[in-house]
Amino acid sequence: MSGPEYGEIDGIEQALALVSREQPAFPGPAAAAGTGAGPGPGTAGGPAAGANPGQPDPAHTASGPADPHPTTSSSPADPARTARAENASAPPTHPAATPWAEARATATRAGYAAPARPRRVPLDQALGQVLAEPLEALTDLPSFDTSAMDGWAVAGPGPWSFQEGAGILAGRATAEPLADGEAVRIATGARIPTEATAVIRSEHARTDETKLRLHALREVIPGQDIRPRGQECRTGDHLLPAGSVVTPAALGLAAAAGYDALLTIPRPTVEVLVLGDELLTAGLPRDGMVRDALGPLLAPWLRALGAEVLDTRCLGDDPQALRKAILGSEADVIVTTGGTAAGPVDHVRPFLETAAGTGAEILVDGVEVRPGHPMLLARLAPDTHLVGLPGNPLAAVSGLLTLAEPLLRALAHRPVPEPYRAPVRDEIPGHPVSTRLVPVTHRADHRTGAEHAVPLHYNGPAMLRGIAAADGLAVVLPGGARAGEELEILDLPWAEGCFT
C-alpha cells in the first residue's frame, strides 16, 4: 500500500495487509549494500531488534528466498522441507542461535527442573495456581438427601394430608418422618424428611386449604426432584487430578467438598528490569528520547501467563546498576528488556559471563526467530532464571512467547495447551533460515463462513501497531507460507478473555 492509501482506512482494517502483494519480500544483496532499495529499520524486512551492526543480517545477505511453491510444479511440496533445502547454505543468524522450537523446549525443561515447593494456601489465595495433589472429596455430595425444588415432600400415594405452617427450610434440622399419605412444604436445598418418596413442585400441585389436602396435577414418580446423598461424589472420590489449574469453578467445588485450603504450586514471581538511557516513562518523545512501551506491556502480560509480578523498574545502561538489581532480586524469574546484543551498552551477556563462576549458565543464547533473535535464557541458580528480551517492542513480545511463556508455565506446572492451527488467508514471505512470528487476526470468509488468520501489517521489530490489533501470532517456518496453508497460531491472552 502507498502512504495515502493508509490514511483512508481506520482501526484494525488499517493493520490488515495483503501480505503476498503489499509486504516487501526480504531484499537481496543490492538492497543490503545500501542502494536505498531495501526497507529501513522497523519494517518487516529490516534488521531485527538488537541486531549487531557488525554482523550481516541473513535476510539482507541472502539472494532472496526462491518461491518454495512454484506454480509450474507437477506435485505439491512440503513448504518447510523445500525452504530448508533451498536455504541449506544460508549463514546462521547468530553464532549460537537455537532453533525456535528447540528454544521453547529448553525453556520448558528449565522450568520443570526447578524445585516446585508446594504450599498450602487458603481458598481465596489459590485462584490460578495448580493443584500439587489430587482434590479428593472430604464428604459425600450432597451430604444428605435434599430437595431439588420448592414444593412438597410426600410419602406414599396421594392425595396427601398436610399441616399449615412454613414447612422445611434449607439449613434447618431434620424434620419429623413422614407417614404414608402425608406431605410437608419444602424449600430447595432443604433436607428431605425420613420416609419421603418424592418431591412435587409447587406448580405441579393443588391444595385444598379447607380440607388440608394436597393433590398432584401430574403423575408422581418415586424419587423425583430429590437429590440423593452422594449423587455427585462419595467421600474419597477423586474430583480433580494433581496439575489442574484452580479455576473459580474448582474453588467452588473444593469448598463444597469441605476444603478451607489447598496444596498448590505457587505462581512464579517475576521482576521486570527495563534497560536503556533513552527511555521516558511519561510525556511525548523528545530530544532523542523515546517512551518506554515495555514497562506498561510486560507486567499485565506476565500476570496473564500465571506469574506474580513483584516490580517493574527502569534502569539506565549501567552495568553496575544491572548487576546490583539482578543479585538483589528475590524473584524466581528476572525479565530484562534490551541489552542482549553485543553493542557497547549491552550489559546482560557480560554480566552472565562474569556470573558463570557462581553457577550461572546460559541455556539459550540467541534464537532463530524474527523478530527477536538476540533473546536469551539463563539459569542463575537452581530456582532462579533470567529471560533477556530484546529492546524493540515486537521483538520483546517474540521473546516473551518464545522463552518466558514456556518457562513460567513449567515453573507453575500448568498444563501444556493443545497446539492450534489455522489456514492463513494470504501468502506470508519467510526468512531464509529463521522462523517468523507474524501478528494475525481471525476473520470469517464472507462467502463460505470459513475462518482464517489474516496477516497484519506493521509487524516490524520496533512496532506494536500490528500486535495491538492481533489475536494471535502465526508461526511461519523458513521459506514462508502459501495462502491457505495451515500454520501454528500462538494465542494471545486477550483472545481468551484473560484481561476482562
Image: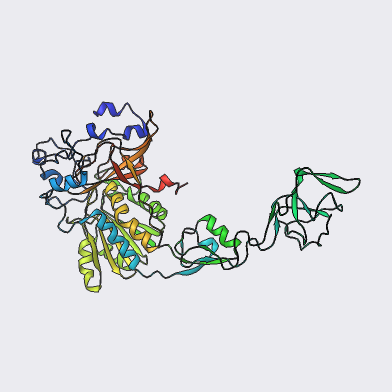
Residue 281: where, in percent of width, then height? 34, 49
Q: How many marks?
A: 0
Quadrant location, the N terminus: top left
Please say whether residue 57 is visible from this viewpoint: no
Q: Is residue 154 above or below residue 27?
A: below
Q: Is residue 208 left or right of residue 187?
A: right
Residue 449: where, in percent of width, then height? 40, 32
Residue located farthest toward the right when viewing the structure as drawn: 210
Q: Is residue 330 left or right of residue 434?
A: right
Please say whether residue 2 is visible from this viewpoint: yes
Q: Nearer the viewer, residue 302 or 188?
A: 188
Residue 123: where, in percent of width, then height? 54, 63
Scheme of colours in the image:
rainbow
Q: Is residue 307 above or below residue 289?
A: below
Q: Is residue 313 left or right of residue 41?
A: right
Q: Residue shown at 20%/63% (left/top)?
A: 350
Q: Nearer the viewer, residue 370 or 451?
A: 451
Image quadrant assignment for residue 63: top left
Q: Nearer the viewer, residue 423 or 10?
A: 423
Image quadrant assignment for residue 195: bottom right
Residue 419: where, in percent of width, then height? 35, 50
Q: Residue shown at 57%/68% (left/top)?
A: 236
